[in-house]
Each structure stands twice: as structure tokens, then as C-alpha cells.
Image (cartoon, rainbow, N blue to C red):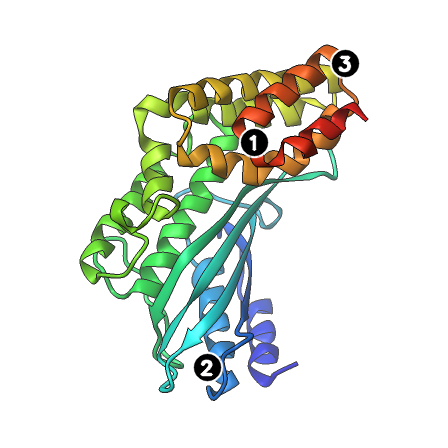
Amino acid sequence: MTRWLGTLLLWLLAVPVMGQELNCTVNIQKPNIQGIDPSVFQNMQKEIFEFMNLRKWTQDDFKAEERIKCNINIVFTNGSPGGDRFEGTMQIQVIRPVLNSNYETVTLNFQDRDMRINYVPFQTVQFSENTYINNLSSILTFWGYVILGIDYDTFGKDAGTEFFEKARNIMNLAVPGGEPGWQAMDGNRNRYWLVENLLNNSYASFRSAYYGYHRQGLDAMHEDVVKGRKAVLSSLETVEKVFTQNPNLFIIRVFTDAKGNELIPMFKKADPADKQKFIRIMSRLDPNNASKYNSVME
């Protein structure tokens, strides 16, 4: 164990976590970067960990066991010789417990392809909701609020709106910084389009379906598996209607990335009619994985 990590763990044991919302693991990889002191990445990982986990993000009180489980995995593919400019990707995964079970469901599994930051080694990452400090601060703050919004949406209808709006504000403040990922023109699968889709009233039924999937679907399965699965199927039908409205909608891809693998074992035990309906819907939403969904008939 490195010295900094040991010190961090000892310090965290002395810090009360009651009320803090996120339980976020952070991992940084740099497979092809040479010539930069490893302590730069170690310190960056420590700073990101503290930024996500030791902050009070909301006015709500969270017990330690209620904190939102999430994982951040950063892979840097380029680094400047001076060790202060890095480029790569950031994978964000959010995980939610299912009521009265040992099962956990992935609510978001997103790859942010625009992780481009300037980082001053051994300098604390600062937080601000109302001003742009630097791209690393904005990216972490943006994703902190998106993580909260996604999780809240699964427990209450449209309960995550406040946090998605905060994420949008962070996005708008970051645009003048000139880094990619914050504008529509930067691509069709970035931070901009995620928040735009989630807050666009034209696609409001998607978020209602996401709530139904988790509360009426997964959370009900401990009482009645068939009823819970029917609720999940109803949510899929709603997502399909949104897809019909706009087949290129980014949040459809976000949905299938998070839920595609989970749905297959769920529907292997469904009745034949529901299996056929499931295959038809998912083959439309996620045609590249149609053969995977067909496996529920085996």
C-alpha cells in the first residue's frame, strides 16, 4: 500500500460520513503513459475520491448504508511531458440496491469520452456551483449531480430534476473554457446530450418509465416476481414509444447500456407471449444486440 493511500484510509476512519451522499470508488489507469511521476496519478485519484465522497451535495440526510454506490474509472491515453495535461475517458457506473433483496441494479453505465483536463499535481480540486474553475472541477461536479439525479429518479417520479438542472448549469458555465463534451457540436454522445435529453419535456415519459422500472418493477419482485416483471415490461413499452418518437435519442442508448444485460435473465422465466414482446421491443431499441435478447427463448 502506498504511503498516501495508507494515510488517506486512516484519515477517513476519523471523518464522520453521516449525511454525505456518495459512496464512490475511483480508479485511474494510464497504460501507455511514460515519463510522468506515478505520484501525480496517485494524488489525482486521492483528490477525486475526496471530491466525490466527502462533500455534502444535497440538503437531505443520508445514513452511511444509504449512500449512493458509484464507480469512476479513468483511463488516460495521453499525458503532457510536464505532467499537467491529460486526455482519456471516464467510465461512470451508478448502482442501486433493490428493495428487500441482495440484488443491485446498474442505473447508469456511461463512458465520457471527453476527459481532457489540466491538473496541477498536489493541488486540491476546488468545488463551485456558480463559477468555472477548471475542467476537472466542472466534470466532477457535473457527474456528481447526474449521479444524484439518476438515483433520485429511481425512487421518486421526476425526483432527480433539481440535480439534472444543476448539472446543466455546470455545463453552461464550462462552455467558455473551450474543452469538448459540453456542447451539442462536440458529438452526439456526450454530457450535453445526456442532460438535454433528460430535461427535455418532449421525452418526459422516458423518466417516468425509468421510475416505474425500478419502483413498480424491481422493487416489487420480492413480493410478486410476475407482477414486477410485468411492470418492467410496461416500462419497456413506454421506452419504445419514446424511441418511436425519436429513434436517434441518446438516452435510449444510455438505457440499453445500463439495462440490456440485466433484462435477459429476468425474461428467461417469463411466459412465451411476454418473451416475444420483450424480444421485439429490445431488438428495436438495441438492434446490434438482437441475438442476445433472442436468447431468452432458449
Amino acid on which the number 2 mark rests in the picture: Val
Residue 295 found in image quarter: top right
User: What residue would you read off at disc 1?
Assistant: 287
User: In this rendering, is residue 120 above or below 194?
Assistant: below
Q: Secondary structure at mark 3?
A: loop
According to the image, label 2 marks what residue?
Answer: 40
Q: Is residue 204 at least partly visible in the picture?
A: yes
Q: CA distance from mark 2 to mark 3?
A: 55 Å
Q: Residue at x 81, y 26 (%)?
A: 298
Whether pointer 3 and pointer 1 mark residues with C-beta atoms closer than 8 Å, the reply is: no
**Which tag, 2 or 1, sits closer to the chain's start?**
2
Q: Residue at x 74, y 34 (%)?
A: 101
Query: In this picture, is 28 found above or below 150?
Result: below
- Amino acid type of disc 3? Asp
In the image, residue 131 sits, relative to residue 48, either above or below, namely above
Residue at x 50% of width, y 71% of height: 45
Helix, strand or loop for disc 2: helix
Residue 277 location in percent, x, y?
64, 15
Report how far apart the C-alphas of labels 2 and 1 lie in the structure.
42 Å
Residue 176 image point, x, y percent: 18, 58
The reply to whether residue 18 is visible in this rendering is: no
Q: Residue furthest top?
A: 273
Q: Amino acid at mark 1?
A: Pro
Label 1 neighbour load within 10 Å: few <14, some 14-19, many 20+: few
For label 3, the residue is: 271
